[in-house]
Amino acid sequence: MTAKPFSFRLIATDGAARRGEIETPHGLVRTPAFMPVGTQATVKAMYPDQVRALGSDVVLGNTYHLMLRPTAERVARLGGLHRFMNWPHTILTDSGGFQVMSLAQLRKLDETGVRFQSHIDGQKYHLTPERSIEIQGLLGSDIQMQLDECIGLPAPREEAQRAMELSLRWAERSRAQFEAMGGPAKGQGLYGIVQGGDVAELRIASARALADMPFEGYSVGGLAVGEPQDVMLKMLEITTPAMPVDKPRYLMGVGTPEDILESVTRGIDQFDCVMPTRAGRHGLAYTRYGKVNLKNARHADDPRPLDETSDCPAARDYSRAYLHHLVKAGEGLAAMLLTWNNLAYYQHLMQGMRDAIEAGTFQDFRAAVKADWVRGDIAPLG
């Protein structure tokens, strides 16, 4: 049976900022969207219904980790990733390429793909564009990613060009495999990934070449990999005008609230990052007035919550003194409450941006958010 086609609807713009909706087999994704990272079929320290209640329309699963454990074949036999992790909403899976480059042992890359040893048990694998798409198809994700080569920055121009051109060839192979597996008929989407390092001409060439391929969405990869923020933003200013207007734009692996706000200003629609969940597990809270390091002793006698105006119980109903105590005592509840708070703040920021773009007041909203960050909390922040 043919599912309703994957689609993107642009609802409003305010400058370069965009408000839209992505329709997938498992529901609508409101954009700009932040996608909590569920690396191993779980958003760490959170229940799925909590993640949904905070306003998340989509979560991210990681192809590299899931192919190693429990394996895509097992997940498929058990009914697919949505059923396996009890998330009946949209799932995006990445290609696994970034993790191969950053985690795997003894990796060797060539035209066919990348050969590597698992960081878990040393078993050997060969991840090709075709195999990456096959794994994502077995998982049953709604939004899938082409396999690409992501290099760190700074990098020589020659290396950036080589990786960009290889990624374009892999994009064609990924698309052919996606169509062979019936992805379009299932209503799924496949995104191409713009590469090119920090070289403007390469970014534009990559974006234009991908735009000539029939992808459902387009991503900007290879940023937030060591370069300063101003370089990342410059690359976005150069790249987004070369990307199709009528397709979603996804900036991979980004980032801080400021990175997200500034990237929406430059026309990006989707984001993912481990930052809010990882920070929560390490005693760091994100709030309207900046970051709060609950490890710091100054919070030991502070009866205030993180944010008394928040709708999130973790931010509103627990004192900083108690949160500090949980962090110092190494209690699991610390990670649970701070992750809850952080994801709540991120989704509150996304909803604020969506509303402001639709109302035509995005620049006022942006200025107010940044003013709060500059103002900081009543007490000095950690």
Image (cartoon, rainbow, N blue to C red):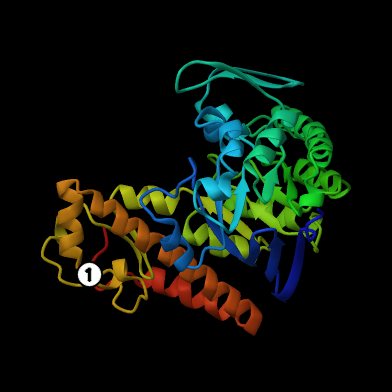
Residue 153: % across, % down:
59, 36
Image quadrant where residue 35 sits: bottom right
Question: Residue 155 vs residue 85: left or right?
Answer: right
Image quadrant where residue 354 sits: bottom right
Please tell me whether mark 1 sits on a helix, a strand or a loop: loop
- Up-down: is 124 above or below 281? above
Residue 82: % across, % down:
57, 50
Residue ranking furthest to the right:
212
Tell me the quadrant of the picture where the C terminus can be found. Answer: bottom left
- Up-down: is 206 above or below 100? below
Residue 320: % across, % down:
20, 65
- Up-down: is 40 above or below 271? above
Question: Residue 316 vs residue 105: left or right?
Answer: left
Image point 69% across, 40% down: which residue?
A: 137
Choose between 204 and 299: the one closer to the eye: 299
Image point 70% across, 59% down: which residue?
A: 24
Classify 10 Å Cα crowding around label 1: few (below 14), some (14-19), many (20 and above): few
Image quadrant where residue 145 sits: top right
Choose between 370 and 351: the one closer to the eye: 351
The reply to whether residue 253 is visible in this rendering is no
Amino acid residing under circle 1: Ala
Q: How many marks?
A: 1
Which residue is the site of mark 1? 379
Image point 45% across, 68% down: which residue?
A: 53
- Up-down: is 114 above or below 268? above
Residue ranking furthest to the left:
301
